[in-house]
Image: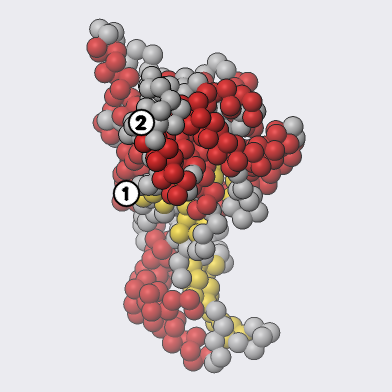
Amino acid sequence: MSITRYLTGITTSGTPHLGNYVGSVRPTVRASRLPDTENFYFLADYHALIKTSGDPVRVQRSTLEIAATWLACGLDPDKVTLYRQSDIPEIPELTWFLTCVTGKGLLNRAHAYKAAVDKNTDAGADPDDGVSMGLFMYPVLMAADILMFNAHKVPVGRDQIQHIEMARDMASSFNHLYGEHFTLPEAAIEDHVATLPGLDGRKMSKSYDNTIPLFAPREQLRKLIMGIVTDSRAPGEPKDTEGSALFQLYQAFATAEETAALARAYADGIAWADAKALLFERLDHEIAPMRAVYDELIQEPERIERILLAGAEKARAIATPFTRRLRHAVGLRPLQLPGDAAPAAGKASKAARPAFKQYREKDGQFYFKLTDARGTVLLQSGGFANPRDAARHIALLQSQGLEALAELGDTVSLQVSEADLREALALLMADT
Ligand code: TRP
């Protein structure tokens, strides 16, 4: 059985709205409860600096609001790893490693950067006018987020697919140069989730200023919904569901039967005011219990801070050793540790040889492990009833190398990357 690792982040530059909820928060909270998954969710506050430079209070407030939103919507911080990007200093370090294997031309093609350049060109301005290096490097930082945890699937909106493809490119380049360290991630797109329209019928988005805050107080929510743009058809006149923002919003929250009932009411000429009242009640029905939790949480920033710090600890339990490995891989190494091959030696010396060790535990079973010259465990076996089985497994690894892993399955567990193990087995072979 294999575990699929999901990872996604939300940029902490604003207040969560209904579009974020339907498109991102609700599906990820649901996905986090699926069996055989491991979930990483984070507040992308380094990313926020790109959009909000000069507004520190907004970044901080948004971080609080988004964290509270995730928790209020049911994300369980004991089951998932929920953290703040800037609590993981390894992320900017990995960003640099990736920067060094990423062609500038690749980033020139990023949609957000290209859009900025096109706009400048059309306006007759310098192509890079107002473009920060933060904006240009956005995809590299995002790749570091994903690759640090070797995520398999990244739930994102369609507009982010290119970023995931770029992360794959960067992972491949790095792996090609330094060995198989990174999993190639894939975008997970929720096909059935429609983009939600905003108050004016265009896509709900902060940049159009047409959003409905997810946790607006009840009366404010009612007012906002009453302000949704409709056509001028009078009560009694049949209305089109097609292209009706009101209808699409309803559909995102209602069951299929409820939606069908509203479609009939449209055909029967329901008054817009009544349709809006229906939408309001339906929305509030789903949101009210979560709003109560949210309102409480937001009053307790220290509690959220504690949750995020605990999440960071979990995340760094992975990021810190992994970064150590990556530093070693790229050549950021201690100059001469005992047991390390002398840099000039070319070929590893005898002292640097990894070795298989066979032993018996108190439980009476027989085990083996492969350690490197410094005693670090590279591979650990499970228990065998007799020593011959253990020896047979060792022989398999010695004769077939990594290929034997498929056959050995659960009887051994890797403590390092396959690339490192391959290297160790090769060293062992070279000397025997
Ligand atoms: N770029 C994403 C957005 O704007 C946020 C984000 C940052 C992200 N890093 C990520 C999403 C890594 C998924 C994975 O919504």
Residue receiving disc 2: 238
Determine which quarter of the picture holds residue 296.
Answer: top right
**Apparent side of residue 269 relative to residue 253 in the rendered image (left or right):** left
Q: Amino acid at mark 1?
A: Ser
Where's residue 343, x and y in %? 42, 52
| Quadrant assignment for the C terminus | bottom left
Identify the secondary structure beneath mark 1. helix
Going by the numbered disc 2, the residue's amino acid type is Pro
Gap between marks 1 and 2 measured at Cα: 56 Å
Residue count near mark 2 (Cα–Cα under 10 Å), binned few <14, some 14–19, many ≥20:
some
Which sits earlier in the primary sequence, circle 1 or circle 2? 1
Q: How is the image coloured?
A: secondary structure
On the image, numbered disc 1 is attached to which residue? 172
Farthest residue to the top: give it.
124
User: Is 134 on the left or on the right of 67, as rendered?
Assistant: left
Residue 87 at x, y percent in the picture: 61, 38
Q: Residue at x 60, y 48 (%)?
A: 75
